[in-house]
Amino acid sequence: MEECFPKTNLRSIPVRIRLEIYQDVISLRNKGLNTTEIKNEIFKEHGVFIRTNTLYRWITNRSKACNQQRIFIPKPSRELSYLIGVFLGDGSIKIEASNYKYCFTLQVKDKEFAEKFSSYLSKILNKSPPYPVSKVNDFTRGKRVRFYVRVSNRMLYEFLSSPIEKLLMYAIFPTEFLRGIFDSDGFTSISAKNYFSVGVGVCGVDLELINFIKLILYKHFRINSTISKSMKKGDHVIIWGKEYTANKDVFVLSINNYDDVKNFCNFIGFSIDRKQEKLKEAIFIKDNFKEERALKIWKSLYFKQGREWVKIKKDSGASPELSSR
């Protein structure tokens, strides 16, 4: 009988469809159909031939369609909105050729960012305790410590491989989606030369995504922003002392109006303590001190390292300038 059917490798079928086939098999068995009848019904419905030994293992509960893999069924949620934002920023997916693992990985410099990602990912995949956060030395751009989370799940991989339009349909919680994006590729833009100004921005190479972020910011939070091209394809840039050539145009979305910056801080913000603390302190200083004093206080708290303001570590704790207020 099996020779009448074309041979099909179940592993080549997307996990979501394989799961549907498995559920149909169990349903047909519960209705009293025998193995031959089940195979015929599955072939008519799905165009897929199930081998007798596979079918037997399924209906006797000796194995399942997805083995030990955690089932991922896309459902809009705050966690998934954040996860999609992170994926469109710092996250990456790949198939490991050596063992055919379908991996989703995040590698970042902020431990709390990795922990937040792990927590949300674990909720989506119904795992307890959360996925571990590991530490690794990264020598690609100088010697840096990085934190990473990795999960192997083909269903999640296939979902994230979808066109961006489909992913955005599931990112229906704007606060979490934007926070995931800004945690990944966002930054504070603070000027402390002749005057003190506070801004927020996010960069990326996908102009369609950048325009979508601009739309969501205004539609849900009435936050205005502007988009500009910060780098052209072929431009040279120095990162951590090493020269790189841009292989794509790079765009920056900027939030510069001060009221919009405060709204961003209050209603969206960063999950990363380092970024959120910097933004809150800059807003506090601008709100409570005049220009000259604001510049002085800021430079007592932060120093410029390249293009970034870095917190000065002090044993005494809070700045006397701030604690006196």
Image: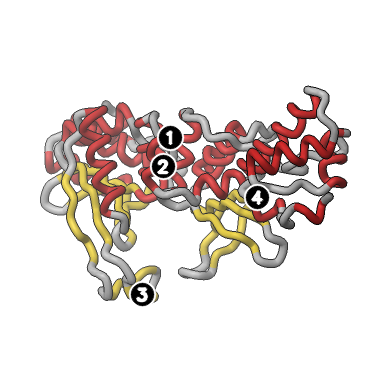
Amino acid type, mark 4:
Ser
Say whether disc 3 or disc 4 marks the residue closer to the N-terminus: 4
> Under tag 4, what secondary structure?
strand
Residue occupying the point 45% across, 52% down: 90
Amino acid type, mark 2:
Lys
The residue carrying mark 2 is: 166
| Front one among 17 and 42 | 42
Residue occupying the point 27% across, 75% down: 234
The residue carrying mark 4 is: 152
> Under tag 3, what secondary structure?
strand
Residue occupying the point 30% across, 27% down: 266
Left or right: 87 as drawn, with respect to 148: left
Amino acid type, mark 3:
Tyr
Query: Of circles 3 and 1, which is in front?
Result: 1
> Under tag 1, what secondary structure?
helix
Quadrant showing the C terminus? top left
Question: Answer yes or no: do the residues labelled 3 and 2 have beta carbons within 8 Å?
Answer: no
Quadrant assignment, res 277: top left
